[in-house]
Image (cartoon, rainbow, N blue to C red):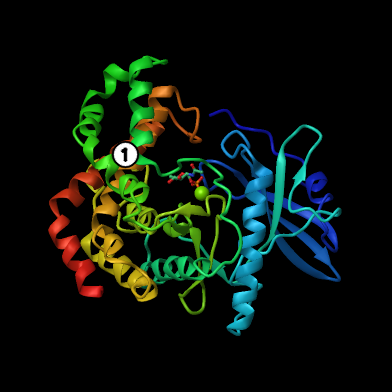
Amino acid sequence: MEKKPLPELDRICAAFAVEGRWVTSCPIPSGHINDTYCSEFEDAGRRVKYVNQRINHLVFREPEKLMENIERVTRFAREQILAAGGDPDRETLNIVPTRDGKSFHRTPEGTYWRMFRYIDGAQTYDQVEDLRHVYSASKAFGNFQKMLARMPGERLHETIPDFHHTRKRYEAFLAALEHNPVNRAAAVKPEVAFVQARAKDAGEVVDGLAAGRIPERVTHNDTKLNNVMIDDRTGRGVCVIDLDTVMPGSVLYDFGDSVRLGAATAIEDERDLAKVGFDLGLFDRLAAGYLDAARDFLVPAETDLLAFSAKLLTLECGIRFLTDHLKGDVYFKIHREGHNLDRARTQFKMVAEMESQMGAMDAVVKKYL
Ligand code: GN1
Ligand code: MG
């Protein structure tokens, strides 16, 4: 929780092939893993913005491979956008290379940095402000999957192996509970019981994938609503961002994870659980947007589980937060005591509400198929 000193962004920026003079940098305080900053340059009397990110290489163990994935995905996206007559400077992330032509810079201290062009005239929303944004963001994720399905070449690297392997997440939780390294297990008995009662859910998607019933595809794997930039003028989803976990997976990971935040009535770490819940109206917009993009390529083994995936991925994320709480907050950044436990509780409240509305959720999916 201790405040990190601001890195020397001017020195970091100097490694990248940017025109003009560095003026200033400031933190963008979002994300639980990487550190993100916005830098401004002055070039021929114009101010130009960039995004700097320090890649958390304790989480992403092989930053080289991660950046190889992002290079491939953004290069392919650029071609597709150009072919469709779109604007590749706004509709995909654009990597700024280093002065020696690499996609990232490793400092002498061993930290990893990358730089993207800043997308003007668009923003992300941590919480729903406009129902149309929900539809648009969900459609953007569907279109992103559709585009990636056409990407030629080798299988992408798994930047975090078994990232959405819910059963392994559950086993990691059991191990943390058993080892109880910071003595927090006794204080979270209701949450532990909640998770254990749902152990059998954990295998549903991963077993389908392993058996070949559910197709493996290229997926985003971190489909929070705020990972789509919404155009200020049109309200449309203009660009899918945060490509760190783009890798082989199931579409169910993406749709399910988008519901976790997209259909929530409160922010992820809300302490007042009375405010936290699952909103079927928001779910309706998510399903409509996603299926307007994806209905043509999905198979029944996928569509049958769309509603369930929302519950599964929300449960999985809650399990990950609770596990990290039990381990002493070693993975997700926290900003207050008990932060991961607060996050786990909101997820479990959402899961409980989804369970009681699963029939209605299935009906929504059917309506848009
Ligand atoms: C992390 O750092 P951020 O906010 O993009 C996590 C996601 C979780 C999310 C929970 C690599 O994403 O899987 O769903 O926190 N990313 C990683 O808010 O673990
Ligand atoms: Mg992320």
Q: Quadrant of residue 23?
A: bottom right
> Residue at the spot x=62%, y=48% of the render?
66
- Along the line of sight, the residue nearer the viewer: 70 or 319: 70
Residue 124 position, x and y percent, is 50, 61
Residue 37 seen by the camera: no
In the rendered image, the vertical position of residue 207 relative to residue 332, given as above or below: below
Residue 74 seen by the camera: yes
Q: The residue tagged with tag 1: helix, strand or loop?
A: loop
> Residue at the spot x=30%, y=72% of the render?
288
The reply to whether the residue tagged 1 has its Cβ within 8 angstroms of ligand 1 is no
Number of other residues with Cα within 10 Å of mark 1, as a class: few under 14, some 14 to 19, many 20 or more:
some
Residue 339 position, x and y percent, is 40, 33
- Along the line of sight, the residue nearer the viewer: 281 or 178: 178
Amino acid type assigned to the residue bearing label 1 in the image? Arg
> Residue at the spot x=27%, y=64% of the render?
303
207 left or right, relative to 17: left
Residue 362 position, x and y percent, is 18, 62
Q: Quadrant of residue 99?
A: bottom right
Residue most toward the bottom? 85
Quarter of the image with the C terminus is bottom left
Residue 148 position, x and y percent, is 52, 66
Total of numbered circles in the picture? 1
Residue most toward the front? 211
342 left or right, relative to 328: left
- Along the line of sight, the residue nearer the viewer: 243 or 1: 243
> Residue at the spot x=70%, y=50% of the render?
114
- Per the image, the residue denoted by label 1 is 271
In the rendered image, the vertical position of residue 89 relative to residue 274, given as above or below: below
